Image (spheres, grey):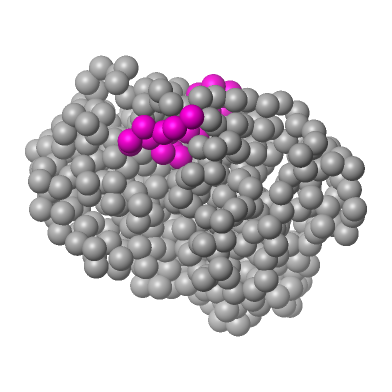
Amino acid sequence: MAMTMSEKILARHAGRSELHPDELIEVNVDFALGNDITAPLAIEAFRSAGAKKVFDTERIALIPDHFTPNKDIASAMQAKILREFSREHQLTHYYEVGRMGVEHALLPELGLVLPGDVVIGADSHTCTYGALGAFATGVGSTDLAAVMMRGKIWFKVPPTMKFVYRGKRRKWVGGKDLILYTIGQIGVDGARYRAMEFTGEVIESLPMSHRFAMSNMAIEAGAKVGLIAPDDITEAYVKERARRPYEFVHSDADAQYESVHEWDVSGFEPMVALPHLPENVRPVTELDEIPIHQAVIGSCTNGRLDDLREAAEVLKGNKVHPGVRCLIIPATQHIYREAMREGLFEIFLDAEAAVSTPTCGPCLGGHMGILAAGERAVATTNRNFVGRMGHPESEVYLSNAAVAAASAVAGVIVHPDRV
């Protein structure tokens, strides 16, 4: 029987030779993760169930990244729960402030999530690892607790939607723009409990950072996973990082898809998602000059080194507008160090932007950039719901790093070519 990537990975982890969409199966999990918001609930459920040990001390990561460095007493207590549980169970992969990063940038960087894996995380953007060719998805905290105990989880096999991107990208158009365009076309529930498979020559030419951005936001279309077939670019990224064996899995040529969407991206511009949904997408040049108060460049979507390089290219020789706060948040310590080594920090500081230690921070309205009533931000983050970055009367516009940097300079949302 012909199968898609998603179906093949699940079949192999369920000990089956074939699977069909909508089947309910139990699969073995290769890796599980939680953060300082979700893991404390999982730990409470783990203990309430009477569990005495985790299924594998090497296959669980706890990463305090959302409200860290701790912004208040409550967040300090949350982080303390992770720290103490990790010590109690001798977890190999607990990453403290100073060693950690935003979880969905950190784990691929460390070679802990790999092609062909089944990965679950108590965070909705766990789907990021689909860029490596893994079946990776977010779950609830009680599901994480069950996996920490047993190393297994139940799934309903999702049908697969195929997305084909052809043509040649213009400068400043990347993975973030492709996924925003896609969500704009199908809506925030257009792939609900589906596997999204991103293909075509445009995807094949994307660097890993852009692929991660696309898979990261599959959840914004309601998808269970967002997969990209592994290739030479994947291999170059993974081979120097992998801490265990991995397997490339590809869809069969005659695999059955629920639907196929195909676009020529040659004429695409950078995209912007307007408040208050990621589906409210328009090309940047179609926007009126919308004033902003804050620009945020970072997050698990666009806080990688390529993103910082794009921002630096725009900011070099420019100053952040006097009425704008520009926050730049490298996603991991390694990215922070590399950006500093390349001289990007000097460009950011000369432009009068602020550079932060790795944290999710403002993305979820946590800290390090909360919006007041009436304020407006353009951000490289992944969600722009009401109150997402602060006050319910604030607004968030989603873009790529170049657009965010250009808007910080102009004081209004603009195409990078404008500065």
| Image quarter in which the N terminus is found | top right
Q: Is residue 110 magenta?
A: no
Q: Position of residue 358 (x, y in %)?
A: 35, 61
Residue in the picture at 26% in, 29% down? 415
Work out whether residue 94 or residue 83 is closer to the camera in this orientation and state it.
Answer: 94
| Quarter of image, res 322 | top left
Q: Is residue 285 above or below residue 51?
A: above
Left or right relative to 223: residue 78: left
Is residue 174 in sight in this rendering?
yes
What range of the chain is rendered magenta? 167-188
Q: Where 274 sits versus 217, above or below?
A: above
| Nearer to me, 253 or 31 | 253
Task: Decide which of 128, 419 is in the foreground and name it.
Answer: 419
- Residue at x 69% of width, y 39% of height: 195
Q: Classify residue 182 as left or right of residue 311.
A: right
Residue 66, given in percent of the width and then of the height, sits at 43, 56
| Residue pictured at 80% horizontal, 36% vertical | 254
Q: Position of residue 142 (x, y in %)?
A: 69, 56
- Quadrant of residue 84 within the rendered picture: bottom right
The residue positioned 35% from the left and 56% from the top of the image is 305
Q: Is residue 175 magenta?
A: yes
Q: Position of residue 203 (x, y in %)?
A: 53, 41
Task: Give the quarter of the image for residue 69.
Answer: bottom left
Look at the image and tell me whether residue 392 can be seen: no
